[in-house]
Image (cartoon, grey):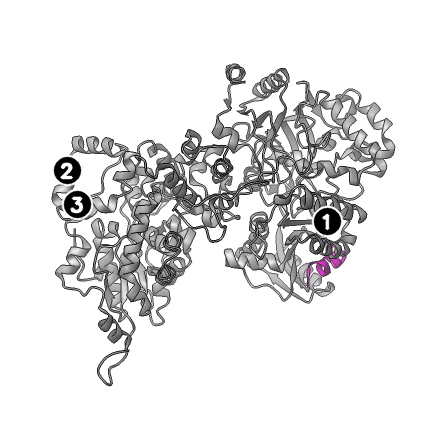
Amino acid sequence: MESAMRELRGRIDGEVDRSERRRAEYSSDASNYRVLPEGVVFPRGDADVRAALEFARTEGLGVTARGGGTSVAGNAIGAGIVLDFSRHMNELLELNAEERWARVRPGLVLGDLQRAAAPHGLRFGPDPSTQNRCTLGGMIGNNACGPHAVAWGRTSDTVRELRILDGTGTERRLGTDLSAVPGLSEFTLANLAVLRTEVGRFERQASGYALEHLLPEHGSSIAKAFVGTEGTCGLLLDAIVELVPIPAATVLVVLGYPDMPTAADDVAAVMAVRPVAVEGMDARLVDVVRRYRGGVPPLPRGGGWLFVEIEGETPERARETAELLCRSTHAVDSRLVLDAREAKALWAIRADGAGLSGRTPEGNPAWPGWEDAAVPPERLGDYLREFEKLMTEHRVDGLLYGHIGDGCIHVRLDLPIADAPQRFRDFLEDAARQVVSFGGSLSGEHGDGRARSELLRHMYSPAALTAFADFKALFDPDDVLNPGVLVRPRNIDADLRVAGLLPTPAAGGFAFPADGDLGTAVHRCVGVGKCRADTRGSGGFMCPSYLATSDEKDSTRARARVLQEVVRGALDWRSDAVAESLDLCLSCKACHSDCPAGVDMATYKSETLHRRYRGRLRPLDHYALGRLPQWLSAATRLPRLANALSGNAILRRIGSRAAGIDSRRTVPELARTSFRRGWNARRKPSLPTAPDQAVAMGEIGKAGAVPVAPAVLLWVDTFTDAFDPEIAWAAVELIESLGHRVVVADRRVCCGLTWISTGQLDGARKRLRATVNALDEHVRAGGVVVGLEPSCSAALREDLPRLLPDDPRAGPVAAAVRTLAEFLEAQPDWTPPDRSDQTVVVQPHCHEHAVSGFTADRRILERTGATVREIAGCCGLAGNFGMQRGHYDVSVAVAENGLLPALRDAPPGAVLLADGFSCRTQAAQLAGRSARHLAQFLIGDSGTGRMSR
């Protein structure tokens, strides 16, 4: 096969890849299924698609089309050739605003189409929750819908014309002329009874083929019938789709009900006001959002809610209709949401539902597979009550949400996949029979794929199933296109990704308290693909390397897929595939907070490097950069000599090469006097002894002594100490101005972050143990620890307990750590200085964003009155990442996604605010801009007692 693939490479302009790593990355989509392809092709144009299809036919391979890879039914994976259209064939070819249509390539992301149409007052109607990464080709393949389908219909309602290659390689234009496909007119006449009685019975009947569109009374549209065929009938080359006007004004109404079935009972009253969106949300899902995300705006009373969007010609008209809705429903409570930011926060619950519902309230993994069944809306309430009984009977649980307005319900269940085929199959068979008994559909939106195609026998007669097979044969007589889906389906319990997996033994690295072991942790990734989304305009940080390269390899999802192969034993920890997969991970931790499933790739990478190199020689940069605090400790004793050596161009090049550092990077200059040396010279007290601390706590002392608060321990990290001691002095002055006594650890201790990021977990554990020894007494006395470097604070708060899980002191020490902003916000009498005359460009640190959040800093900056421009995304240096040889270009590309454009666009005199040493270094080296820490910004230029360089 390798020689044949080499031949294919010579015939196309795009890329052909059948490496172990690439095959692992494309072995799954967002479903429960895993199928390793023979290879992946990234076509650049029609000729490449044609050549790949011809190659597959010659070699006897199937062909599976793939866009964003967000299919939850397993219809974007296959054992033959996977064609990824998203990388190159992603153009918006034409947009006709006057006639309201667009011509698109299959790999165009929906969000990009929406951005292009918006200036014309237009949009594409269907909007699934994955719209910032799903592609138009995938939407056409699955007949995607979304919340606004109640007003603007499904994807099939938007399609005018499609240009495809059928399974024989013949190009066809599909519109409303049945003669475009030989034999289709005769097929339609021969199957009129099936087409008029079994398909198209209600709006959300997504299972099977939508053959009702072939009927003359439905317009004889082959294009619409092709939508939802899940890649089994043709490969899309381009499509003409209709656009709709953006509403002039909208209002969000939230209606509260006792539970979801009761909410569903009220759907007729809701639909009477002709809303543009109706979504249902179970209280338990909202509880999960509160627990893991926070920031949920107030909701009306209830155990289930309907989110109803109302449009109007003016805001007043929209509000009038909204108030009418509140009066006419049977909701126990209601609320009008008029603030756009608040409405966006509420809709975000729905957008992240697929990932956030990946755990049941009890913490068990929840899976797709029965996640979008639909029934006629008037029967939805009764169906939900019976479905709850079925879940109880089969001992499964999950969180409900979905498109209540048109009868489609989403749910992720803790399906007994480990018990497949017994309990797994039994539940799905019973669930299929139940939804059919309500006149419903196995799928209301996502298609059937590998998850439900076998169950179509419950929903359709033998005559209908034969008609489906005959329809496919007109397009794909040799069953080349996506075999095993819809027609001649694979068993629902074949190829399950997590079935039969054994626990992953511990290796002396991280503890995984929420998952149990690393194997379960990496399978948190169910493939929803938010890491592929372009979030630069919406405040997201994930995934910086993918945004820089647009290669699936560099997404969090792809890395998780490779590690899933490792824990199942299909790949070795030390394989090139694993090294390549993790190489461009910045360990920024953004996925830990931004991924709806809570994937923490920085931790998985660290654990993998620990397992890969434990007891073996490591790359040079692991010793140079991974143990940098050791070298800096020595260098700060002779800073002038260290600066002279690093400032010599020849010596720097030699040293950089020896240390595995990119020669284009300069070494930051050490301060003339480190903070610790300056602190000792001023004879500031170190951590108090036990009696001293007791006095500070008011527990011991002379009679009548006034009790005082415990001292504040300032965590002076290695980088602040060695390079930017003025930051620590500013923090000291700020904290002391509030009446607190500042202490520092009486010996040099470290958070171990550089050891952690390079996977030297034994070394990290040693340093964290010393840190706990140094801080324990202070913490037990009630003291807090204020960190200045966000990455160090994050390591103490999160990595410390997971690397010392058996040390009872680790948890309290981690809980005592505060960022400077968090500490200041807790001071009741503190008022930030007035900075209303300044513009601030602020770079939040990725680790702070992921672990503690930037909310406290944001509130403080708002209180200063400054004009704040907040940068979204990673700076690109990311600790040791941007310094390592081979990473410079990607580091700069990441900076171009946020930091550098923000600096170029900043007004003259704007202050760059960056608490992270990496962020300040990147700005200085790439843009020549100095940055200030929050402590310096708040103290201003009036501070005294700080040490200069």
Q: Amino acid at mark 2?
A: Leu
376 or 903, which lies in front?
376
What percent of the width, then of the height, locates residue 307? 64, 56
Left or right of 78? Residue 844 is left
Do the residues bearing badges 3 and 1 touch, measured as CB atoms within 8 Å? no
275 or 562, which lies in front?
562
The residue located at (73%, 30%) in the rendering is 487
Mark on residue 406? 1
Residue 841 in the image: above or below residue 894: below
Q: In terms of image quadrants, where is residue 886?
A: top left
Q: Amino acid at mark 1?
A: Asp
Counting residues from the start of the chain, the first of labels 1 and 2 encountered is 1
Q: Label 2, on which residue? A: 645
- Magenta stretch, residue numbers: 259-272
Q: Label 3, on which residue? A: 635
Q: In terms of image quadrants, where is residue 650?
A: top left
Q: Amino acid at mark 3?
A: Ala
